[in-house]
Image: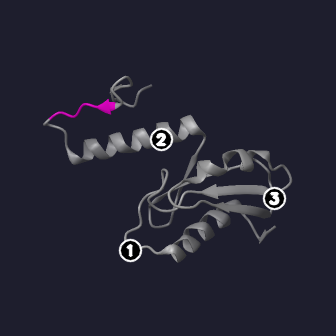
Amino acid sequence: LNDGFLITPFHNMALISPDTTSADVDAHTQAFDKMCGELIGNSIFKLKDSRDYDYVANDVESKSAILFHHGTPGDCTVWSSWVSGISTVRAIAASRPGYGLSSRRRGRNVASDIDNNSELLEHFGIEKFV
């Protein structure tokens, strides 16, 4: 039910013991990321290099898509109402590395998003953009 963690919502913090290991912190971070995604409707796609890629998408089955890209700072949720309002093609918005719930990608540049988006689009079977 709570993934084994106690978080005090009125303090918005987690209490960590001196006996807490790095593995414990990593497990907490993963559980917290999952919870945040469930609350705001995000999904997490696991990239080939094992990083998490945070996205929102509509439920339209289509080989065509509109891909939304957020600015800095920001994340995919800025496009949530647009994505959910499109009913004729797949609509997808993803959070760039280090934003939203997407894992960081050290040494990245703006063009690094192309690889991430290509993997996500392949996952959805997208063949063209509209």
Q: Which residue does the numbered mark 1 point to in the structure image? A: 107
Residue 79 percent across, percent down from the top left = 66, 51
User: Colour mode?
Assistant: one colour
Q: Which stretch did the figure color magenta?
A: 13-17
Q: Quadrant of residue 42?
A: top right
At 66% from the left edge and 67% from the top edge, which residue is drawn? 122
Which class describes the residues within 10 Å of circle 3: few (<14), some (14-19), or many (20+)?
some
At 46% from the left edge and 75% from the top edge, which residue is drawn? 109
* SS at circle 2: helix
Give how far apart the Cα atoms at labels 3 and 1 are: 34 Å
The reply to whether discs 3 and 1 touch (Cβ–Cβ < 8 Å) is no
User: Between tags 1 and 2, which lies in front?
Assistant: 1
Q: Amino acid at mark 1?
A: Gly
Q: In the displayed orientation, state which residue is furthest to the front.
A: 72
* SS at circle 1: loop
Q: Nearer the N terminus, badge 3 or badge 2?
A: 2
Give how far apart the Cα atoms at labels 3 and 2 are: 27 Å
Left or right placement of residue 31 versus residue 129 in this view: left
User: Mark number for residue 34?
Assistant: 2
The quadrant of the image that shows the C terminus is bottom right
The magenta stretch spans residue 35: no
Which class describes the residues within 10 Å of circle 2: few (<14), some (14-19), or many (20+)?
some
Q: Which residue does the numbered mark 3 point to in the structure image? A: 62
